[in-house]
Amino acid sequence: MLRTSVFPSRYVQGAGALLALDDELARFGSSAACLVDANVKAILEPLFARAHHVKLHARNVHAACTERSIAEAAAWIRGTGAQMVMSLGGGKVVDTGRAAADDLRLPFVCVPTIAASDAPCSALSVIYDEEGRVIRDRFVRRNPDLVLVDSQIVVSAPVRFFIAGIGDALSTWYEARACQRAQASNLCGGRATAFAMEAAKLCRDTLFAHAVQAVDDCRANIVTPDFDAALEATVLLSGIGFESGGVAAAHAIHHGLAELPQTHAFLHGEKVAIGVLASLFLSTVPDSERREVFQLCSDIDLPTRLADLDIDVDDAEALALVAERACRSGEIIHNEPYPVTPAMVVAALTAMNRYALRNNF
Ligand SMILES: [Zn+2]
């Protein structure tokens, strides 16, 4: 199998990065169609005031990323005659803009205003149906031409989003390592490059070094070097690491947990964190490795127990449902370097829960 890696073309991050947006956009043309999350409308006005080189057209997006919302966005973008597409907001706006830009073969600029997952830098849009269920992962032709992250905007968003983003990023190293050991394929159709593995490892090391302080800084709404370091790990390093390294048990267990209605109130990264912790019980793992991951999750208020996701550990039927979904044929859990069965997943979830209780995590 070939080694393959993908990256965003350009990445800009820091407090006040939005001040550079006009100059950055001018690389791609003189007019931009902006899909804007209704929650962040307030930052739009200063952007318009500073738009000297690039004419901005804006449209509010409320809907989830569905085939219909993508088609509607694409029709609007075509009507503006814009030379690039920009998404400003959270996951659904980003994924809608990414897919519409791909349909129109236009450059795509991603300006995430929260850091709740590692999706911004990727070439992946998650498509939902009108009932809010995930129907497929759509891989677009190219990663974003620009990802611009204003740390000041992200730090001002609710801290829970940032914590969830760290949960998502925490999975990156463990899943990339599993894929490497199993010689399994990454998300861009090849094996990981050494660079992707280093990005995943640096992601993990950066989180262990800076995430606790970064979350506290985020609670106080202050951009610090620790916050910026953890933000880069969450958005850039995890983005490269998951896409070019590959995904495995932690995300498969996430998909299983998402089958339970009571987990719908929880964010992607919160469920992924439980997936990471449980995956540490699918094989013999040194206690020091388990301990450091539990400690980090506990320190930053990520879930460490099933009850944190409103799941009753004694609900055998629920755990069986999670495990069956996680282990279905062709699922990414089979990227682990050993066979995984539903019974192993139930055992891992139960052992994980007992470990957290026993050690007060
Ligand atoms: Zn994820």
Image (tube, helix red, strand yellow):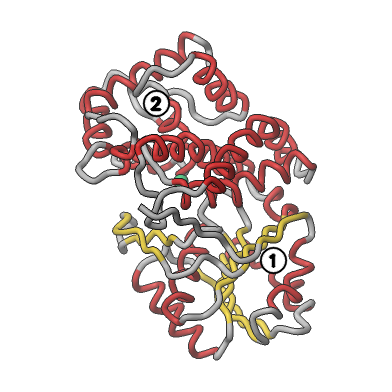
The amino acid beneath tag 1 is Ala
Question: In the figure, is residue 332 to the left or right of 355?
Answer: left
For this rendering, which residue is in front, 139 or 271? 139
Relative vertical location of residue 46 with respect to residue 161 in this rendering, above or below = below
Mark 1: few/some/many CA within 10 Å (<14, 14-19, 20+): few
Earlier residue among tags 2 and 1 = 1
Q: Amino acid at mark 2?
A: Ala
Q: Position of residue 316 (x, y in %)?
A: 23, 22
Percent x, y for residue 245?
46, 46
Identified at 76% across, 72% down, the residue is 46
Q: Nearer the viewer, residue 284 or 150?
A: 284
Residue appearing at x 60%, y 78% in the figure: 58
Q: Residue at x 59, y 26 (%)?
A: 296
Q: Residue furthest top?
A: 358
Q: Circle 2: is it few (<14), some (14-19), or many (20+) Cα within 10 Å?
A: many
Give the residue pinned by disc 2: 278
Q: Which image quarter: residue 128?
A: bottom left
- Seen from the viewer's position, the closer of residues 16 and 69 is 16
Q: Which mark is residue 42?
A: 1
Whether label 1 lies within 8 Å of ligand 1 gets the answer no
How far apart are the two marked residues, 2 and 1, measured between alpha carbons? 40 Å
Point out residue 139 in the picture as x, y percentages from the top left corner. 39, 63
Left or right position of 206 against 96: right
- Is label 2 in a helix, a strand or a loop? helix
Q: Does 312 appear above or below 66?
A: above
**Picture quadrant of residue 82:** bottom right
Q: Is residue 244 or residue 44 the one in the foreground?
A: 244
